[in-house]
């Protein structure tokens, strides 16, 4: 469990001086990493630092243009993902990649299903094997249910079970905890530590420094596509790692705000959706940031979806500037001045194959359309304006949004909605899976929007973000608002008591 013990293990995987270019773009200039048997190594860096490219080299998605790559001292030259898996490397990506029409068990064992004596797939055995994996994870999950409709948290757990089932020597975890609750994270950590103690090498990628310092034996830092340093966790600090990641000190992730909220813009009264949430009452004023906090499954995202009209509420009302909205009608919400940045930006916020310009202008198609034809030059001009405002790092407005880093994808989603000049912005997990430097930029942007009079409803699972950004905190527990806290009342203890339903006992 100690870093010193891990440091004595033999080097299992080594990548030195890896170079990867895509045309004129240098995605990785010096990809260098050493993973030892029986250790957890954290990989830290801003979005765009080269982490994803390095991981894709390990996974066999990309071949390096230069550099050396060895496993157990033998040179590696992967031609495919299958080559990487056969060598003993398993990768859990930040975004789940499940087949929605297949069952949980089928997703775990796809391509390697157990067979019976007749050579047919043994579905019963496959479900038993999947159930055993979830028992090992300490997570209740029905192996026979379809993957469609599962939460991101459940999808991530299936990906983790899939990786564990491969008995990989090297396990790469790319933001696996981004959508997990505290209890689920701790379960994952127990599994990771057990795998490490059994001799596996784990590469853990996370923007959450509390997780990095709680789990990792050593920390490797990358910046601008280059290797910067590696430190034993016990011999460094968060401040030192942040400084190496961004090349500068990030003194304040949360900008100071001292604004007086204006009149009520968004009013939610008695909102309910049968079996999901009920009796939701709150308002958001002009220039105010209100946070919806709570554990995964508390109903926060479901409330936001109902306010925007994606899901139809079964009771209550939503009003913008005194005008009541028809339930289940996103177009009416947009027309009233509501913008909605969803939690899952890749599946719900963006069309990944389209360009930056096209994604940014999706909400303004009617404005740029005349006689059924789109004015592409106007579309690009508008997109370029917002790209500059939000500092989106892109080679051109024609670049596919799928090729951007997670932080820049989030900025494009924001640009899409800010282009509509909304009165209310609902933003679900605004900094999920993005680096510390980009987090500071997003926080600054949200604070500026509120400063200009926008009413902002923010959903976040990161308690420091909730406490650092919100003027008021509404805590949800099992589909109800269990506490409404002013900024001065909101503490880690008060929020967690309310989120776990123990606030009454604590009082």
Image (cartoon, helix red, strand yellow):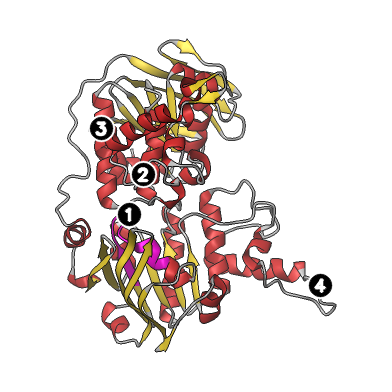
- What residue sits 45% from the left and 64% below the top? 188
Percent coordinates x, y for residue 350 in the rendering: 48, 41
* 147 and 197: which is toward the camera: 147
Q: CA distance from mark 1 to mark 4?
A: 45 Å
Circles 4 and 2, Cβ within 8 Å, touching? The answer is no
Under circle 2, the secondary element is loop
Q: In the image, is 443 to the left or to the right of 51?
A: left
* 349 and 145: which is toward the camera: 349
Under circle 4, the secondary element is loop
Q: CA distance from mark 1 to mark 2?
A: 18 Å
Residue 47: image tag:
1
Q: CA distance from mark 3 to mark 4?
A: 59 Å
Residue 97: image tag:
none
Percent coordinates x, y for residue 70 in the rendering: 40, 83
- What residue sits 40% from the left and 19% below the top? 266
Circles 3 and 4, Cβ within 8 Å, touching? The answer is no
Residue 396: image tag:
2
User: Which is in the foreground here, disc 1 or disc 2?
Assistant: 2
User: Which is in the foreground here, disc 4 or disc 2?
Assistant: 2
Where does the magenta region start and end? Answer: 41-55
């Amino acid at each position: 469990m100690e870093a010193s013990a891990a440091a004595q293990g033999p080097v299992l995987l080594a990548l030195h001086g890896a170079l990867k270019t895509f045309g004129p773009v240098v995605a990785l200039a010096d990809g260098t990493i050493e993973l030892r048997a029986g250790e957890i190594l954290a990989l830290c860096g801003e979005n765009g630092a080269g982490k994803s490219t390095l991981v894709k080299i390990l996974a066999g998605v990309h071949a390096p243009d230069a550099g050396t790559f060895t496993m157990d001292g033998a040179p590696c030259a992967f031609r495919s993902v299958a080559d990487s898996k056969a060598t003993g490397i398993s990768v859990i990506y930040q975004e789940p990649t499940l087949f929605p029409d297949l069952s949980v068990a089928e997703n775990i064992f796809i391509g390697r299903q157990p067979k019976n004596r007749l050579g047919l797939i043994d579905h019963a055995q496959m479900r038993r094997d999947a159930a055993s994996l979830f028992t090992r994870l300490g997570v209740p999950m029905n192996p026979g249910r379809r993957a469609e409709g599962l939460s991101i948290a459940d999808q991530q757990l299936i990906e983790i079970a899939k990786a564990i089932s491969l008995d990989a020597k090297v396990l790469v975890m790319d933001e696996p905890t981004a959508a997990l609750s505290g209890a689920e994270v701790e379960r994952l950590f127990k599994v990771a530590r057990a795998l490490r103690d059994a001799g596996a090498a784990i590469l853990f990628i996370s923007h959450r420094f509390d997780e990095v310092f709680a789990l990792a034996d050593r920390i490797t830092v990358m910046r601008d596509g280059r290797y910067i340093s590696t430190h034993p966790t016990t011999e460094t600090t968060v401040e030192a790692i942040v400084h190496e990641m961004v090349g500068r000190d990030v003194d304040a992730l949360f900008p100071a705000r001292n604004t007086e909220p204006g009149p009520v813009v968004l009013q939610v009264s008695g909102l309910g959706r049968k079996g999901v949430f009920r009796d939701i009452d709150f308002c958001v004023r002009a220039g105010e940031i209100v946070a919806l906090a709570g554990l995964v499954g508390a109903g926060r995202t479901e409330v936001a979806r109902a306010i925007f009209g994606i899901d139809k509420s079964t009771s209550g009302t939503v009003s913008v500037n005194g005008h009541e909205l028809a339930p289940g009608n996103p177009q009416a919400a947009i027309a009233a001045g509501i913008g909605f940045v969803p939690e899952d930006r890749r599946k719900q916020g963006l069309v990944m194959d389209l360009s930056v310009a096209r994604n940014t202008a999706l909400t303004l198609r009617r404005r740029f359309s005349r006689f059924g034809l789109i004015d592409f030059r106007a579309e690009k001009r508008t997109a370029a304006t917002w790209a500059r405002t939000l500092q989106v790092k892109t080679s051109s407005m024609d670049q596919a949004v799928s090729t951007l880093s997670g932080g820049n994808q989030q900025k494009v989603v924001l640009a899409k909605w800010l282009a509509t000049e909304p009165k209310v912005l609902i933003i679900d997990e605004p900094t999920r899976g993005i680096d510390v430097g980009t987090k500071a930029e997003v926080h600054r942007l949200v604070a500026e929007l509120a400063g200009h009079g926008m009413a902002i409803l923010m959903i976040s699972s990161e308690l420091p973000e909730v406490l650092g950004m919100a003027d008021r905190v509404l805590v949800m527990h099992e589909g109800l608002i269990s506490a409404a806290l002013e900024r001065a009342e909101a503490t880690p203890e008060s929020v967690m008591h309310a989120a776990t339903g123990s606030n009454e006992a604590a009082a």
